[in-house]
Image: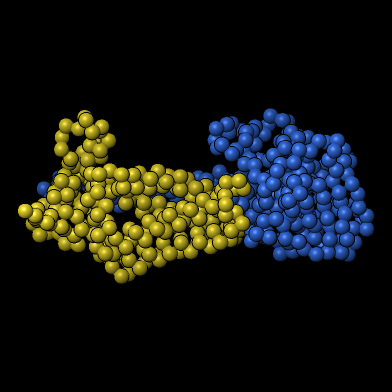
Amino acid sequence: MDEPRPRLVQRFSGAERTLHWVYALLFVILLLSGLFLYLGPGQNPFLDRRELMRSIHLDAALALVALFLLVAAGSPGTLRRLRDDVEWFDRDDARWLLWVLVPRRLRGRPLPPQRRLNAGQKLNTVLTAAATVGFTVTGTLMWGGSALPTSLSEAADTWHLLLTEAMIPLVAGHLVVALLFPSTRGALRGIVTGRVRLDFARRRHARWAETLEQGEDTV
Amino acid sequence: MPAGPEDVFRGRPIGRRLFIVLLGAGAAGIALAKHAYAGDDATPGNVATSVPVGSMTPDEGREPSEGVHPNIVPPERFRYYSVGDIPDFTERAWRLTVDGAGLDGGMELRLADLKAFPNVAIRSTFRCVTGWRVRNCVWRGVRVRDIVDANSPNAKAKHITFYAGDGVYTDTLTIGQARSDHAILAWELNGRPLIREQGYPVRLIYPDMYGYKNVKWLRRIEVKPVHDLGFWEQRGWDDNAYVYTPPSNG
């Protein structure tokens, strides 16, 4: 006899998924084009395409700003909901962060209940948003270049690079958790299709699942 | 005021505060870095400062940079780039040819001949277009204009092409740029002879512009009426490599 089809629930809207994936694509383009502007001879196969790399980097940066403006204009509820999702941290969020840091064999308690975004996803969202603003401000100052005091463009340059160095482990960690951990497969499905299995929601996002079952949450 | 049941359930509103704190920390970081770099502000007036010749002892330029980056060779914190093989000149074999249609004269200089011109020393920041920089470099050498003037420049002297000893790399300056107080042929950095990777025995230093204009292992200076594009400029890089808004007569 066929098993009953698992019930799916909507976790991310189309606008949220568009924001996530276009941001991810632009981030990769910015990272690679930035790397090819940064590396010197012997390390960089695109040194003789410096102007092209600079154009790609600037265009991708403009596209990133445009992405947020478009989402804000076309789907204002998306950014508002994201803001509300990351705003509140409670005791379960603190427990969740401790829980994921403890080695698996030492975890006595079950996973602390979480809302639609768990504590790690909230932190990741806040850090990424702050870094995006930081990249935009420092990048604009660098772009202003020779028209600004050298000390300001050099300070911006230093922080642009430091932000990049800080974001690489954050993004790498995000990718490892999303792609390599079987326990997060449901979350990956959610950001691809928008929907997750209800049993996944109950297991990993119990607080959110409760609101779904009470009919309080719609995407 | 004590928190109500709803507040206890929702926790604390931390997200926006954390975001604002991070932005504040970033702004403070930029302000601190700007303050730290304030002495470097590159303008036509202070891109380089003259220092007494010989004032830098070999240990003064040292910075504790070991282990900072695999490409940074202590003590000068440079990353060394080369588009060809690094030449291995000896002082005995090296010669600098000065020629071109813009000169009525011309000469071939040994290192000792070069050092016999009036020596100057400048303190400046070396800036690479890829973003790294080395502050407080004290370069000792002779002014490019002194070498040009010693060879009777004529009305065709509009541009100078500098040729590296690797046989590949070249770059150019206008005669106006090359006449700057800051344009020197340097053989010493921070009280020490240049190392091979740094351009031994002699390199061009023009700190008004990014490092790719500062040709290493100089072998030839050609003064001419026409403008050539340098190695990277032929590949699309800016011919105007000023690190600040260039002077209108540049």
Residue B104 x, y percent position in the rendering: 93, 58
- Residue that appears at 88% across and 61% down: B101
Seen in the image, is A109 located left or right of residue B140? left
| Position of the C terminus of chain B by quadrant | bottom right
* Chain seen in yellow: A
Residue A72 x, y percent position in the rendering: 32, 66
- Residue that appears at 43% across and 54% down: A28
Q: In which quarter of the image is residue B247?
A: bottom right
Reply above or below: A48 against B189: below
Q: Chain B is drawn in which colour?
A: blue
- Residue that appears at 45% across and 45% down: A165
- Residue that appears at 58% across and 57% down: A50
Residue B130 x, y percent position in the rendering: 58, 50
Number of numbered callouts drawn: 0
Seen in the image, is B90 located left or right of residue B61? right
Q: Nearer the viewer, residue B77 or A198?
A: A198
Residue B13 can be seen, yes or no: no
Reply above or below: A126 against B65: below
Residue A185 can be seen, yes or no: yes
Q: In which quarter of the image is residue A215?
A: bottom left
Seen in the image, is B198 located left or right of residue A175? right
Residue furthest to the bottom in view is: A74
Seen in the image, is A27 located left or right of residue B87? left
Residue A122 x, y percent position in the rendering: 28, 49
Q: Nearer the viewer, residue A35 or A117?
A: A35
Residue furthest to the left in view is: A1
Q: In which quarter of the image is residue B90?
A: top right
Q: How is the image coloured?
A: by chain
